[in-house]
Image (cartoon, rainbow, N blue to C red):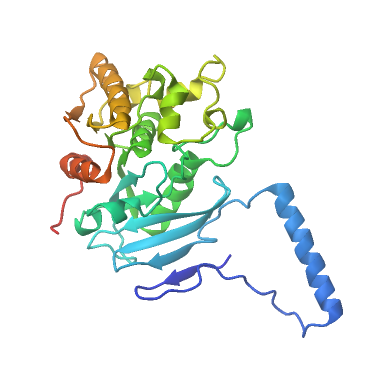
Amino acid sequence: MAQVTEQPGQVTARFRRDVLPGLPAATSGHLIFVKALLAVLALAVLLTGPPEFAGDAGLAEHWLTGREVDVTMRSAAVGGEVTTRLLLPPDWSREATRTWPVLYLLHGSGDDHAAWTDHTDVATLNIGAIVVMPDGGHCGNYSDWWNQGRGGAPAWETFHLTELRRILETRYHAGDRRAVAGNSMGGMGAMHYAAAHPDLFQAAAAYSGAVDPLSYPDATESMWLLCPGSDWHNLWGDPARPNEVGMWREHSVRDVSGLRGKALFLSCGDGDEIEHVVRGESQALVDRLHAAAVPVTTEFYAGGRHAWPDWQRELHRSLPMLLAAIGAGRMGR
């Protein structure tokens, strides 16, 4: 797949199919040969799965503004093309020799890579970090799926923290200071990523985050509320089975040792049914953090709904803490 770069103001085809070089003018014999070759290649893909990601193969950029770009890449982990929206610092340049800290913003269920810029003012904040807003699937839950014990795609955690991270570092000058924040499903992802990968993140924030599904009386019911129609046996297995509950425990952050030494922020309201559920989950995580003497900043407010106006406010509330932890700053509006 050829690399395509769209400069600001341009709209081009996202990917180009390269023609086979050196073929003579088409004849019926040549066409039969080409069709047979394509059939063999298609069979090989079916037998071997998606090709391993290598370098910038299959990478495409679509510039929305001079600082905002959608990057689409082929992911072996997810098993298809995935788009990530980047908001680059005002002083970023492709030719720079320096690196920039990174702030991941993870979306909730039903949203995609455009959610944070579509629903908040984050694109106007001139943050001195690379803001990374990856697609996490309609209900991917920032997880490498269990798939009835078979594993395999979709593996969102591997995509975000291995494949995407490699591109951020090699192509966009991302450094090794990282914070992660998210709303709802993305709040769960933020706390899980920070706890499970303590060497990668210095700070984490969850806004109305589904951070502890196991604390709910019926764990699968609480998750179904956030992702209606989902089969949680495919995601993490059955929490009632001892040999399958492990992934539930990991994504409920039952082990908080990986969060020690990080800047942490959790916030929730109580103005609707979903906020009541995630508030209980957030309080359960806060209680474990306190029991382990791990500091955490909380903002449990009265009212509020499971909605973007509240999450934008909480992003603003937590942003100074997140940026300070990674050595970044605000550079004006």
Nearer-the-camera pick, 138 or 12: 138
Q: Measuring 85% from the left and 80% from the top, which residue is drawn there?
A: 28
Q: Measuring 29% from the left and 57% from the top, which residue is drawn there?
A: 98
Work out whether residue 232 can be spotted: yes
Q: Along the horizontal axis of the image, is 164 left or right of 314? A: right
> Which of the 4 image quadrants contains residue 149?
top right
Q: Along the horizontal axis of the image, is 16 left or right of 187? A: right
> Which of the 4 image quadrants contains residue 242?
top right
Q: Measuring 74% from the left and 48% from the top, which residue is drawn there?
A: 47
Work out whether residue 99 can be spotted: no
In the rendered image, the quadrant that contains the C terminus is bottom left
Q: Position of residue 276 (x, y in %)?
A: 28, 26
Q: Position of residue 87 (x, y in %)?
A: 30, 57
Q: List the single residue furthest toward the front.
A: 272
> Which of the 4 image quadrants contains residue 222?
top left
Nearer-the-camera pick, 57 or 225: 225
Q: List the single residue furthest toward the left.
A: 332
Nearer-the-camera pick, 199 or 68: 68
In the rendered image, the quadrant that contains the N terminus is bottom right
Q: Position of residue 237 (x, y in %)?
A: 55, 25
Q: Position of residue 209 (x, y in %)?
A: 32, 33
